[in-house]
Image (cartoon, helix red, strand yellow):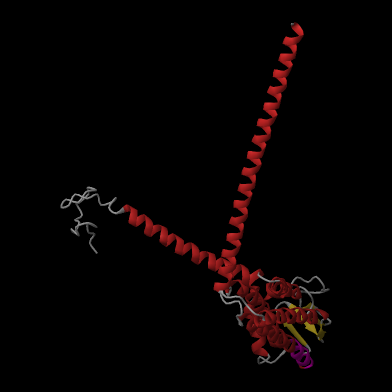
Amino acid sequence: MASKCPNCGRVLKWYDVKAECKDCGVSIPNFNWEARLEEDAERAAVKSASFNRTMGMFKYSVWGTKLRIARIILSFVPIIGFIVPWFSFKSEGESLGIDVIGLFTDGKSLIDLFKSFFGNMDLYFTNMTFENYSGPVTYTMLGVLFMVLCLLFAVIAFFMILIRNKNPKSKTMVIFDVLSIASSVVSVIMFTMAVKAAPANIAYSLGEMPFYNMTGKIGWGYFVAVALLTVALVANVLVMRAPAKTHDELEEERLAKKAEKEKKAREDELRKEEERIEAERKAAEEQAKIVEEARAKLEADKKKKK
């Protein structure tokens, strides 16, 4: 779209490089600059108000009340549940503990299983095909998959607190918490099915890890993990059901706090001004007293000399 002179409407050509319009002679860059400055100020005020509303809702949604502060903490705590043992597999060959870093595991940990799987995925799929996808290898890997999904849903639920800040009563966090707990249950069921399928597969291998006469049981860490996930779910449900302030209410509170802050600042300025005036008055009185004493002393000295 071609540019035009804001005063007379003349279409400007590419070679019109001067600041003044050829027809009316007005300075195009400076034309009506006061009105444009006011428009810019109005747009800046609108954007500032929108930003303040957004930040106000974000602060309120995340840590606006004691319950919401507790919620953000309790939604992060379930991550601890993935470093404790969910399940343990024992055999005459290798032993495998289902916790991420092997802190409570004597044999191999999940991190060792991940290294083995991503190092030679073909071997795992070959073994699963050999057992017709219904043996201990298949069920173990499915259990690991749902455990990873459980962790993923818990992390998403945590970040949804930040992402869904415009809707403080959002059900999204609750949904992902429920999916996380459900995934953990399915994960342990898969591990249990792997143990039940072991008698039909006396010897098998998870990658390079051989298992003979495998047995297994649920670990105490799983109950800790479920408890932490449930606490996070309850916290999100309580926040969802609790009364929530609207954008307008938060904006009114912000403006009231701003007005109170400005009032306090004005009172401080008046108090400082009064203190300054009082200090100047006292200094003047003190100076006048000094001068009066000096004069009296001078008069006394004169009388003494006479």
Provide the major secondary structure of the magenta segment: helix
Question: Which segment did they paint magenta?
Answer: 191-199
Residue at left 65%, top 74%? 158
Front-lying residue, 287 or 32: 287
Question: Who's the residue at 20% across and 54% down the image?
Answer: 14
Measured as percent of width and height from the top left, residue 253 is found at 60, 67
The location of residue 268, given as percent across then percent down, is 63, 49
Q: Nearer the viewer, residue 259 or 66?
A: 259
Q: Is residue 65 magenta?
A: no
Pinpoint residue 193: horizontal percent, then vertical percent: 75, 91
The quadrant of the picture occupied by the N terminus is bottom left
Residue 66: image x %, image y %?
A: 71, 71
Asked where in the image residue 155 lies, by quadrant, the reply is bottom right
* Residue 286, picture quadrant: top right
Please give the count of numbered marks on the rendered protein: 0
Q: Tell me the quarter of the picture where residue 116 sits.
A: bottom right
Q: Please say whether residue 122 is visible from this viewpoint.
A: yes
Q: Residue furthest top?
A: 306
Residue at x 72%, y 77% (from the top left corner): 208
302 above or below 189? above
Give the left or right position of residue 266, taking residue 301 as reference.
Answer: left
Closer-to-camera residue (232/145) = 232
The answer to whether residue 94 is visible is no
Q: Is residue 193 magenta?
A: yes
Quadrant housing the C terminus: top right
Q: Horizontal placement of 216 versus 42: left or right?
A: right
In this picture, is 241 found above or below 302? Answer: below
Front position in the image: 101 or 156:
156
